[in-house]
Image: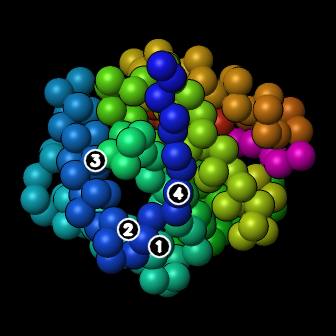
Amino acid sequence: MTDVVVIAPAKPLTDRKVFLGLWREFMEERHASGSPILPSNKNMAEFLKLYDSYMVGSIRGGCFIASVDNQPVGIALGGENFPGGLALETTHGNIGILWGVYVRPSMRRKEVAFKLMAAGLELGLELGFEGLVTQAAPDNAGSQGLKDGWLQAFTSGSVEYYFDLRENRYAARVRFK
């Protein structure tokens, strides 16, 4: 039997707890893999502020929840150029960011992240972005392999990969079709 993955926009109040639980799992996993960002209560509160900003519309963007059998298995956030609401002018046009894609280990390699990213790309188009910046940690082999597939499926082929030394991760700037 194949798991049916449902991707839905987060509901502002009712999905706060879901977001926070999945985000804590993500932060704990990344910290165990060497990320210097602590999965502390203070940091969780900061990410919850960002979630709330997306949900009430003070930052153009949104959050998506992936679920299987009504159980949350993944999340993705995206919107204006940078978390915090900066919408900078760039040579690439009006650029958004898709970040915070996390899928529980038991559901990886089942196209959950691909579906979350596709939902984020659709949101980017709805919000009028001309392109998208996304990142994947260099030690995340699944994400590194995934990016080529979704970039080919959803973009015009105008892709610029770069390694962000401050964040210790690869990133890609892309243009929508």
Compute the Cα span from label 4 to label 2: 15 Å
**Image coordinates for residue 59, horizontal then vertical, percent:** 52, 77
SS at mark 1? helix
Is 128 located above or below residue 151 in the figure? below
Give the numbered dot on residue 8.
4
Compute the Cα span from label 3 to label 2: 12 Å
**Image coordinates for residue 58, horizontal then vertical, percent:** 49, 84
Give the numbered dot on residue 51.
2
Give the numbered dot on residue 54.
1
Residue type of the residue flagged with mark 2: Tyr
The reply to whether the C-beta atoms of the residues labelled 3 and 2 are less than 8 Å apart is no
Residue type of the residue flagged with mark 3: Leu
Residue type of the residue flagged with mark 1: Tyr
The magenta-colored residue range is 173-177
First in sequence: mark 1 vs mark 3: 3
Compute the Cα span from label 4 to label 1: 15 Å
Q: Nearer the viewer, residue 53 or 94?
A: 53
- Using residue 89 as the reference point, say whether residue 31 is left or right of it: left
Mark 3 or 2: the one toward you: 3
The reply to whether the C-beta atoms of the residues labelled 4 and 2 are less than 8 Å apart is no
Give the numbered dot on residue 22.
3
**For the point 51% across and 38% down, which residue is it?**
5
Compute the Cα span from label 4 to label 3: 15 Å
Residue type of the residue flagged with mark 4: Ala
Is 108 located above or below residue 171 in the figure? above
Is 140 located above or below residue 50 in the figure? above
**For the point 38% across and 68% down, which residue is it?**
51
**Does residue 127 appear anywhere in the picture?**
yes
SS at mark 4? strand
Magenta part, dominant SS: strand
Q: Is residue 75 magenta?
A: no
